[in-house]
Structure formats: structure tokens, C-alpha cells
Image (cartoon, grey):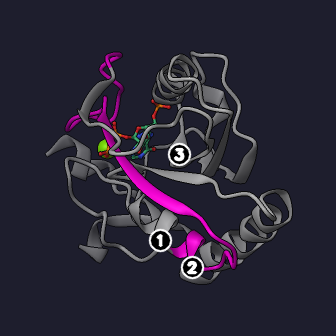
Amino acid sequence: MNDDILKVLYSQDDIAAITKRLAGELKRDYAGKNPLVVCILKGAIMFMTDLVRQLDSYVELDFMDVSSYGDATESSGEVKVIKDLDTSVAGRDVLIVEDIVDTGRTLSYLIKIFQTREAKSIKVCTLMDKPERRIKNVKADYVGTQVPNEFVVGYGLDYAERYRNLPYIGVLKPEIYAS
Ligand SMILES: O=P(O)(O)OC[C@H]1O[C@H](OP(=O)(O)OP(=O)(O)O)[C@H](O)[C@@H]1O
Ligand code: HPA
Ligand SMILES: [Mg+2]
């Protein structure tokens, strides 16, 4: 699996440093609140679990599984809800945790849903932001790092369901996409 990687963009240490900084910002902003932390499956799983373990006040966790990329490196344009939340967001401070905001379609869709469901506040914490590819006008409130316009894998992010278990984030060799 490691042989498929062309270059490492963020090492385990880089990711840990970014996560620590974001957790510091969240601790400050959510002190005394009881936010509902919503992990967007599957990509955000690693980031969310590392992030919340650095928060030292009460939070609740829930999971929503949405997908629009399938096995491709381009969004299908259609966001599908595969699993909805178990918790009602009405009146809650919702913190959406994402691995990456790319075209912005997923986030735009989620924000609309949570607004309709009358969340008290909706904020977004993303490990990575790829602003060059944006189609929908959405912005995360907490951004770990901006990434170049390349398809990245690892630390939860997949290509055709592979590479999520890499502990770092990298770019695949071009022949992997071709095969
Ligand atoms: O800004 P966008 O263009 O919408 O892309 C971002 C979304 O795409 C990826 O999910 P994907 O649909 O691949 O599902 P997965 O997390 O299960 O891999 C990623 O985890 C984000 O949720
Ligand atoms: O760069 C990416 N990598 C993996 N999944 C993604 N979903 C949106 N952008 C990406
Ligand atoms: Mg994916």
C-alpha cells in the first residue's frame, strides 16, 4: 500500500500538530456548551476520534454517512445519505467534523439539512480545505490546512475505498488511477 504513494503531504506529526491547534480553538469557543459533534462518515472518522479526545468538556457524538464520490476522484454531483443521525439537532450547537471540503457540495447539503431541522448553531471543523475546487459557496469555521488541487488519500480519505488506514496523507502515483 505504501508503495502506491507518490508523495506524503502531511505526516503523522503534521496531522497531530494541526489537530492540537484546532482542538485549542474548539475548547475556547465551546467552553460551557454541550455541542453535538457530527462526524461525516467515512472520511472524517480518524480526524474526529483524534480531535474529540483532546477536548476536555462535555460533548455528544453522532455520525452521518453521506457519499458523493463512490469509487471516483470526481464528485458525482449527487450527495446520498446512507445513514442519518440518531440524535435530533433541534436547538443544539452542532459541530460538523469533516476530513475535507472540496467542491463544497457535501457541506452545503448538510448545512441546509441542519438548518431545516432548526439547529441552534451550525459550525464546521475540517482538517483540509481545497478552495480551488469549490462549486458551492461554503466555508468552514475551523480549517486545519489548505491543500493544493490534488486528490489526497490516507487518514480516513479513500480512493475506491482503499488507503483510509494510512496514518499520513499523501498523493497516489498516477498509474494507480489509471489501473
Ligand atoms: O466538498 P465535496 O466535493 O463534497 O467533497 C468532500 C466530501 O467528499 C468525501 O466524502 P465521500 O463522498 O468520498 O465519502 P467517504 O467519506 O465515505 O469517502 C469527503 O469525506 C467529504 O465528505
Ligand atoms: O482529495 C480527496 N481525496 C479523497 N476523497 C475526497 N473527497 C473529496 N476530495 C477528496
Ligand atoms: Mg470517499
Mark closer to the chain start, 1 or 3: 1
Percent coordinates x, y for residue 166 in the rendering: 35, 73
Q: Is residue 12 left or right of residue 123?
A: left
Mark 3 or mark 2, whichever is nearer to me: 2
The residue range painted magenta reads 50-78
Residue designated by label 1: 49
Percent coordinates x, y for residue 143 in the rendering: 72, 50
- Residue 144's tag is none
CA gap, disc 3 to disc 2? Answer: 20 Å
Q: Is residue 142 above or below residue 133?
A: below
Residue designated by label 3: 100
CA gap, disc 2 to disc 1? Answer: 6 Å
Q: Nearer the viewer, residue 131 or 139?
A: 139
Q: Are the residues at dot 1 and dot 3 in contact (C-beta closer than 8 Å)? A: no
SS class, disc 2: loop
The quadrant where ligand 1 appears is top left
Residue designated by label 2: 53
SS class, disc 3: strand
User: Quadrant of residue 70 in the image?
Assistant: top left
Q: Nearer the viewer, residue 14 or 126?
A: 126
Q: Are the residues at dot 2 and dot 1 in contact (C-beta closer than 8 Å)? A: yes
